[in-house]
Amino acid sequence: MKIKPIKNLKDYNNALKEIDKLWNANPNTREGDMLEVLVTLVEAYEVKKYKIEPPDPIEAIKFRMEQMGLQQSDLAEVLGGRNRVSEILNRKRNLTANMMRQLHKKFNVPAESLLA
């Protein structure tokens, strides 16, 4: 296969087929080098074509709550009380910078998601 930039879906699918053929290639061989280059090209195409945006801040908080088994009351100290938690999770009040900082610090909610 001639290696070239991936510009469209056809190029992408061809590269994936070639990667599949080369998957078990040994490192530091001609085939291994070709595999490495193709994987890099496919990753670059996917980042450009299928960009994944960070989740909505409220959805990120709810997801973290689910992961950690937290209740709304567990967020009360960080967000300023039970009523405030309810208002935020129901999108009636915006997060402040301090709230975002505390959610990130205490519950490890990704800052990128909170700032979206």
Image (cartoon, grey):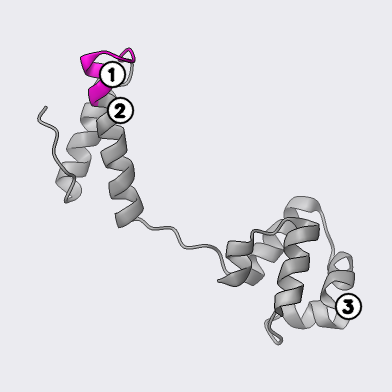
- Mark closer to the observer (3, 1): 1
Marks 1/2 in contact by CB < 8 Å: the verdict is yes
Amino acid at circle 2: Glu
Which residue is depicted at the point 66% across and 71% down? Answer: 58
Q: Is disc 3 placed on a helix, strand or loop?
A: helix
Which of the 4 quarters of the picture holds residue 16?
top left
Q: Nearer the viewer, residue 111 or 84?
A: 111
- Mark closer to the observer (2, 3): 2
Amino acid at circle 1: Gly
- Image coords of residue 81 (percent x, y): 89, 78
Q: Earlier in the sequence, mark 3 or mark 1?
A: 1
How many marks the image carries: the answer is 3
Mark 1 sits on what residue?
Answer: 32
Mark 3 sits on what residue?
Answer: 82
Quarter of the figure that contains the C terminus? bottom right
Q: Is residue 8 left or right of residue 24?
A: left
| Rendered view: 100 above or below 70 | below
The residue segment tinted magenta is 25-34
| Rendered view: 45 above or below 102 | above
Crowd class of label 2 (few under 14; some 14 to 19; many from 20; radius 10 Å): some
Q: Is residue 89 visible?
A: no
